[in-house]
């Protein structure tokens, strides 16, 4: 069994100012401060980030792949939500 | 998402029923169409076991692989080389960490995997059971061992299992300097004093054959290849990759002015490939069985680090527990 | 180690300091070498942990600190070599000096011991180096100021790391508390040197090159006490005997450390690596 006293934390890195945090991987740590330090030492050795989030893996709620169809299929056919759906004459500008 | 907590092993039970066959057929067709498998997706139990075995062996190899080169950190011959070597050995630790994290998405706990390494139950790359008696061995490891590893690893960036593939992308990116720094060490030695040239040649003699063995048994004798290829965990066979390595490396050795220790090595003009002599698989199997030059030392070093660190890990856990108790007392 | 020139102290005491009177190069070379050696020796020691740390993540953490310190050491050695003007580069200074020519503070050369010894040594040094580098950022020696400005950021993280671990170990289990208190006890006598000025430091302080060592004591102690209080550790009483590594007076550890570090350069004189 995994040692529950050194749980997993998911690491999110903001690569540059202005970009969103992106999932990078995970680390083990006994406390939040250690998790942040481990994340820094493991995932930003080459200057990959300007900001870090860590969150206990057990606190993440994820969708179930078995439900992927009902969750995500319905959005597929709403093509009118995309700008390319609309035909605008060439001569009309800034639209 | 790579989260151990998201794994629900009981949900992945192999179904012997028609249901199971349908799931497996669907899985295979998804893999065949190059879709990635993610941690919570249904997967055949054998696929899961194969991956846990392969990823954890890979992680162990990175961790044990810190030792032969780590042997030279305190004795690196210049401050620049010391910095490079520290960063490289540190990277190997980092790669071990990425890989353990990928294995954990399959429901394996890192503690258990490390336990298997320390008890001798798990395998790691045999190459790290060879010694590094001279500084040139650090160069030879970077040039040959990392060279062979990269050849093995690049196809793994396209492996069907998402977390493993993503870990490999990161690893391959970071490793690109490892082989180059090794070659640079060899080049400096090869152009150096007679003692340095001798050191470089001896290191090549030590590492050449073990590097060829890193690709694993010949295709005829490899028991895992067929499934792994079908599951798109593996994309080239051992012999294909080994040949590619030899073809790339021999001209590099010639450039260094060093002699590859294989009297049968020759260029086959027709195919453009180098033909090489027979690999001593008896030696490979002996090292695999634990009878290599440094198997005992490597495992003993890992055990020693793990044991001496136990009180530290205990302390960190106890501290975190106290903090939690204080927080909840304050909240109450 | 020769002492600073009295003439220089007089000149700076007069207050008329032009841009060309940054204390003699020889004095600055000696001073910069002290800073360089301390960072280099700690880097060398932390390097020995890589692959042996209590957890994989600590292999990485200690390696990061070692790499920072090695980087500091290299910049400072290169500068010391230039000031010295005898054509010695970073490697000549690192690999071809005798132990008695090394002028790191004695605390830096104390053995790694167990993890408590290492993180305690680091804490004591980090808290001091922060104060030191912050002061050096304002040095009238611009090059030194630039090196310090880079180093101070690194050192703040080092303190975060060492402080975090001293707290966890001090307030962890009974065993870890005991080991950490013992480590503090053992290392404490070597901290007096950090604040005990000698004529070289007096002269460079007067010239506005470096801080007066005594001026760093209060800040150091405050940083230290903050961590030790949280770690439930007790400050030992002042030590009577004082070591002066910075003057080249070392105990037995440094010789072994250098024998290992210098072996290839010593065995193959003149070879390029």
Image (spheres, grey):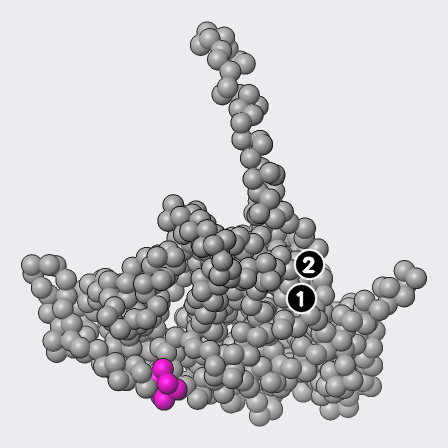
Residue C136, by quadrant, is: bottom right
User: In the depicted view, which residue is nearer to us: C237 or B6?
Assistant: B6
Residue C141, by quadrant, is: bottom right
Numbered tag placed on residue A7 in the rendering? 1
Residue B64 in the image: state x and y as whole percent. Answer: 46, 77
Q: Is residue B136 above or below residue A47?
A: below
Can the viewer see residue B98?
Answer: no
Q: Which comes before the other along the chain, label 2 or label 1?
A: 1
Residue A3 sits inside the magenta stretch: no
Secondary structure of the magenta portion, mostly?
Answer: helix
User: In the depicted view, which residue is nearer to us: B182 or B312?
Assistant: B312
The residue shown at (53%, 74%) is: B113
Q: Give SS at disc 1.
A: loop
The residue shown at (54%, 14%) is: A95
Relative side of B133 to C57, left or right: left
Q: Quadrant of the N terminus of chain C?
A: bottom right
Name of the residue lying farthest toward the right: B332
Q: Which residues are magenta?
A: B287-293
The residue shown at (26%, 73%) is: B221
Label pair 2/1, CB-CB below 8 angstroms: yes
Numbered tag placed on residue A58 in the rendering? 2
Number of numbered discs on residues: 2
User: In the depicted view, which residue is nearer to us: A6 or B197?
Assistant: A6
Q: Quadrant of the C terminus of chain C?
A: bottom left
Residue C212 in the image: state x and y as whole percent. Answer: 72, 70
């Amino acid at each position: 069994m995994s040692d529950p006293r050194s749980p997993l934390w998911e690491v999110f890195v903001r690569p540059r100012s202005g970009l969103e945090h992106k999932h990078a991987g995970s680390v083990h740590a006994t406390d939040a401060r250690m998790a942040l330090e481990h994340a820094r030492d493991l995932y930003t050795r080459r200057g990959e980030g300007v900001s870090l989030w860590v969150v206990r893996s057990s606190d993440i709620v994820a969708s179930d792949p078995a439900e992927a169809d009902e969750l995500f299929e319905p959005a597929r056919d709403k093509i009118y939500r995309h700008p390319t759906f609309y035909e605008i004459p060439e001569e009309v500008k800034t639209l | 998402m790579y989260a151990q907590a998201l794994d629900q092993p009981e949900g992945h039970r192999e179904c012997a029923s028609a249901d199971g066959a349908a799931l497996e057929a669907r899985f295979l067709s998804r893999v065949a169409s190059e879709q990635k498998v993610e941690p919570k997706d249904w997967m055949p139990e054998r696929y899961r076991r194969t991956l846990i075995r392969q990823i954890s062996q890979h992680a162990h190899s990175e961790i044990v692989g810190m030792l032969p080169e780590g042997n030279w950190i305190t004795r690196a011959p210049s401050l620049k080389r010391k910095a490079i070597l520290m960063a490289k050995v540190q990277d190997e630790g980092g790669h071990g960490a990425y890989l353990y994290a990928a294995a954990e998405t399959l429901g394996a706990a890192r503690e258990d995997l490390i336990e298997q390494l320390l008890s001798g139950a798990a395998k790691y790359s045999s190459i790290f059971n060879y010694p590094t008696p001279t500084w040139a061995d650090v160069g030879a490891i970077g040039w040959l061992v990392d060279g062979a590893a990269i050849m093995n690893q690049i196809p793994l960036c396209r492996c069907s299992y998402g977390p493993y593939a993503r870990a490999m992308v990161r690893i391959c990116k970071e490793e690109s300097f490892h082989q180059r720094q090794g070659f640079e060490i060899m080049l400096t030695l090869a152009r150096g004093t007679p003692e340095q040239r001798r050191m470089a040649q001896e290191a090549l003699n030590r590492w050449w054959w073990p590097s060829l063995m890193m690709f694993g048994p010949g295709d005829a004798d490899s028991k895992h290849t067929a499934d792994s290829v079908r599951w798109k965990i593996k994309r080239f066979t051992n012999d294909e990759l080994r040949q590619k390595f030899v073809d790339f490396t021999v001209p590099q050795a010639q450039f260094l002015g060093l002699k590859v220790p294989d009297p049968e090595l020759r260029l086959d003009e027709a195919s453009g490939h180098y033909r090489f002599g027979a690999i001593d698989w008896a030696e490979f199997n002996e090292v695999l069985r634990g009878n290599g030059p440094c198997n005992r030392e490597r495992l003993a070093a890992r055990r020693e680090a793990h044991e001496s660190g136990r009180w530290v890990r205990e302390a960190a856990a106890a501290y975190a527990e106290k903090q939690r108790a204080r927080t909840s007392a304050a909240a109450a | 180690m020769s002492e600073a020139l009295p003439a220089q102290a007089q000149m700076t005491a007069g207050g008329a300091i032009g841009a060309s009177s940054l204390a003699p190069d020889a004095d600055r070379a000696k001073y910069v070498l002290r800073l360089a050696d301390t960072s280099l020796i700690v880097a060398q020691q932390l390097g020995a942990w890589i692959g042996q740390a209590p957890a994989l993540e600590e292999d990485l953490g200690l390696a990061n600190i070692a790499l920072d310190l090695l980087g500091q050491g290299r910049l400072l050695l290169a500068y010391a070599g230039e000031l010295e003007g005898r054509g010695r580069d970073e490697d000549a200074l690192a690999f071809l000096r005798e132990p008695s020519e090394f002028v790191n503070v004695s605390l830096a050369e104390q053995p790694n011991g167990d993890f408590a010894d290492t993180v305690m040594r680091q804490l004591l040094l980090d808290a001091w180096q922060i104060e030191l580098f912050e002061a050096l950022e304002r040095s009238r020696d611009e090059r030194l100021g630039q090196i310090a400005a880079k180093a101070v950021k690194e050192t703040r993280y080092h303190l975060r790391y060492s402080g975090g671990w001293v707290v966890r170990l001090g307030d962890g289990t009974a065993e870890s508390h005991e080991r950490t208190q013992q480590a503090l006890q053992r290392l404490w006598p070597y901290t007096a040197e950090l604040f005990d000025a000698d004529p070289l430091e007096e002269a460079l302080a007067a010239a506005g090159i470096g801080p007066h060592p005594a001026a760093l004591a209060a800040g150091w102690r405050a940083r230290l006490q903050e961590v030790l209080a949280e770690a439930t550790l007790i400050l030992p009483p002042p030590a009577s005997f004082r070591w002066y590594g910075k003057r080249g007076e070392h105990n037995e550890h440094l010789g072994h450390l250098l024998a290992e570090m210098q072996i290839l350069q010593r065995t193959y004189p003149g070879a390029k690596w």
